[in-house]
Image (cartoon, coloured by chain):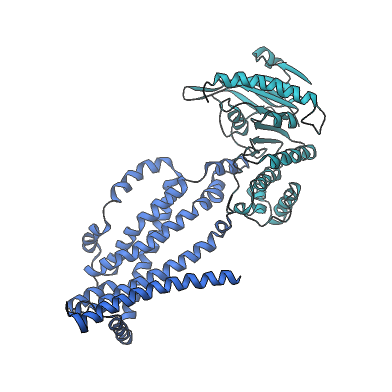
Chain colours: A cyan, B blue
């Protein structure tokens, strides 16, 4: 483990090899009207890395994710994926939302086959892909159910399968387990690590749970508030599977808790 | 399963009991007045049996069926026109902000005017033939269909649109695969409202300018002081409306079967 403070500077970001990183944020700023939500984000993410954006509400972590997804545009600066500036949503960058965002009029199978269907692939092929990914998330036998009859955990599994079935190289997850109960949440965290190991995606995962971030990520980006931005980038070298009671784990948790406490204080009464 | 059957019997039994209760009170008042109290002219409130008798007579002469066909055919034609225009315009306005700004105030100005206010004008424009009635129904039914369509599109969950675009949907694909299916429930509600309104206004239209139809039949009965024919006309309209609504609800259930599986919690 090594924790290093993050000091964004133009000098530093220009010296970085952009060819090596999968995603690079260059001087990203985001304003809503006069409200500065994100101030000067510079960050480089390697291919197949697992990054957690961690912070209290109002730190701009979801905004940052939406900018990578192409669902929001930065006011200043650019995000590059594979060296190309992001200028809109793209099938190569899959998104999993906290609200599941499943199409209620489609069965789980058709939800997962949505991406391949958009590409105009033949029915047999898209069903084969959808069946494969539904079984990858442990939902074989639930192909013909509608989202309305699935539990929260099952819905999020379908949503993950739907994002994966498009075979994106980047997977963006916006507090995907935030609405789930603690047990379901831990199970899905473990399964997500398994999937990440097999499928090899560059993953960005937004959360406000410190232990979730340390459990999952090989890099935790702690965000600051007022204005939102990066506070500290922490690389985590603990071997998987990680044990939440491990001394290093607890030490990291304590360290991040202190950082976040400062940031929450800045928000005033919440 | 047997519990379900029991509940069904209870449900239908309850509904039937309500109908029988109404018939019983009606008979009691009508017969009571006719044979016991003589409080008002018996012609003013015929008994259920009188209405049944009228129904048989009118059916035998073929007049009832002719009038039903005339009304239903007008309602259907007017409604189809309203459905095509209402859904079409609703989709166009709902998906284009500029059009919405242009059309919305216009609709909001016209909507509070009871369609009946335009009926005499429509008779002048389109004559006393079929066209004036069909256009009048089309005009009246247009509004609920149009408004619910626009509303349906406006309240499409934005996260679904975001999800689809992140999966690579183009604008056309977004419309066809997300906006349209998401707005379908409210479009169907609009169609049901529009159909109900068509039946509402056809009677008034046929009062004014028609020589066939259920509204004509009721108005005609007034000149002959035949209250039982008036009631017959009203009941037939009620029965047709009930049946059509039941069919539309069935259709809605079939089309939106995914909504039936919502799990609590």
The residue lying furthest to the front in this view is B36
Q: Quadrant of the N terminus of chain B?
A: bottom right
Residue A205 in the image: x percent, y percent?
A: 67, 32
A16 w.r.t. B260: above or below: above
On the question of residue A226 being in view, the answer is no
Residue A105 in the image: x percent, y percent?
A: 58, 54
Residue sitting nearer the eye, A170 or B246: B246
On the question of residue B96 being in view, the answer is yes
Q: Is residue B250 left or right of residue A178?
A: left
Locate residue A266: give its quadrant: top right
Residue B201 in the image: x percent, y percent?
A: 30, 64
Residue sitting nearer the eye, A183 or B224: A183
Locate residue A240: give its quadrant: top right
B10 w.r.t. A59: above or below: below
Residue A116 in the image: x percent, y percent?
A: 67, 48
B25 w.r.t. A28: above or below: below
Which residue is depicted at the point 44% across and 46% down? B94
């Amino acid at each position: 483990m090594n924790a290093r403070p993050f000091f964004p500077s133009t000098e530093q970001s220009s010296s970085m090899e952009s060819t090596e990183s999968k995603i690079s944020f260059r001087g990203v700023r985001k304003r809503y009207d006069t409200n500065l939500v994100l101030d000067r984000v510079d960050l480089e993410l390697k291919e197949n890395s697992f990054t957690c954006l961690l912070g209290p509400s109002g730190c701009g972590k979801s905004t940052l994710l939406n900018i990578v997804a192409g669902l929001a545009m930065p006011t200043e600066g650019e995000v590059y994926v594979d060296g190309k500036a992001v200028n809109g949503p793209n099938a190569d960058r899959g998104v999993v939302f906290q609200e599941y965002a499943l199409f209620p009029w489609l069965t789980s199978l058709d939800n997962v086959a949505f991406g391949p269907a958009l590409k105009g692939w033949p029915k047999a092929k898209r069903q084969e892909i959808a069946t494969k990914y539904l079984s990858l998330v442990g939902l074989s036998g639930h192909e013909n159910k509608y989202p309305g009859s699935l539990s929260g955990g099952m819905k999020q599994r379908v949503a993950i399968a739907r994002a994966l079935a498009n075979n994106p190289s980047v997977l963006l997850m916006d507090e995907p387990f935030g609405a789930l109960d603690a047990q379901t949440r831990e199970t899905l965290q473990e399964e997500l690590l398994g999937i990440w190991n097999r499928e090899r995606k560059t993953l960005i995962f937004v959360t406000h749970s410190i232990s979730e971030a340390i459990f999952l990520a090989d890099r935790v980006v702690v965000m600051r508030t007022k204005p939102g931005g990066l506070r500290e980038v922490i690389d985590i070298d603990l071997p998987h599977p990680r044990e939440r009671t491990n001394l290093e784990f607890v030490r990291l948790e304590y360290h991040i808790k202190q950082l976040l406490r400062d940031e929450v204080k800045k928000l005033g009464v919440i | 399963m047997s519990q379900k059957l029991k509940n069904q019997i209870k449900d239908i039994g309850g509904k039937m009991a309500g109908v029988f209760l109404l018939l019983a009170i009606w008979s009691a008042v009508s017969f009571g007045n006719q044979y016991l109290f003589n409080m008002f002219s018996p012609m003013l409130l015929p008994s259920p049996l009188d209405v049944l008798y009228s129904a048989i007579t009118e059916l035998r002469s073929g007049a009832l069926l002719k009038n039903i066909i005339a009304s239903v055919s007008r309602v259907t034609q007017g409604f189809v026109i309203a459905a095509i225009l209402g859904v079409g315009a609703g989709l166009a306005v709902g998906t284009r902000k500029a059009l919405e700004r242009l059309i919305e105030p216009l609709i909001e100005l016209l909507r509070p005017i009871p369609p009946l206010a335009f009926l005499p004008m429509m008779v002048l424009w389109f004559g006393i033939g079929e066209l004036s009635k069909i256009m009048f129904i089309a005009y009246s039914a247009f509004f609920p269909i149009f408004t619910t369509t626009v509303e349906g599109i406006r309240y499409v969950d934005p996260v679904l649109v975001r999800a689809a675009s992140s999966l690579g949907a183009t604008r056309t694909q977004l419309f066809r695969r997300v906006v349209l299916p998401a707005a379908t429930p409210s479009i169907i509600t609009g169609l049901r409202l529009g159909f109900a309104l068509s039946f509402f206004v056809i009677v008034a239209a046929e009062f004014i300018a028609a020589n066939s139809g259920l509204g004509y039949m009721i108005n005609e009965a007034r000149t002959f002081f035949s209250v039982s024919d008036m009631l017959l006309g009203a009941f037939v309209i009620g029965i047709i409306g009930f049946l059509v609504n039941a069919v539309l609800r069935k259709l809605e259930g079939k089309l939106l079967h995914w909504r039936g599986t919502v799990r609590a919690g």
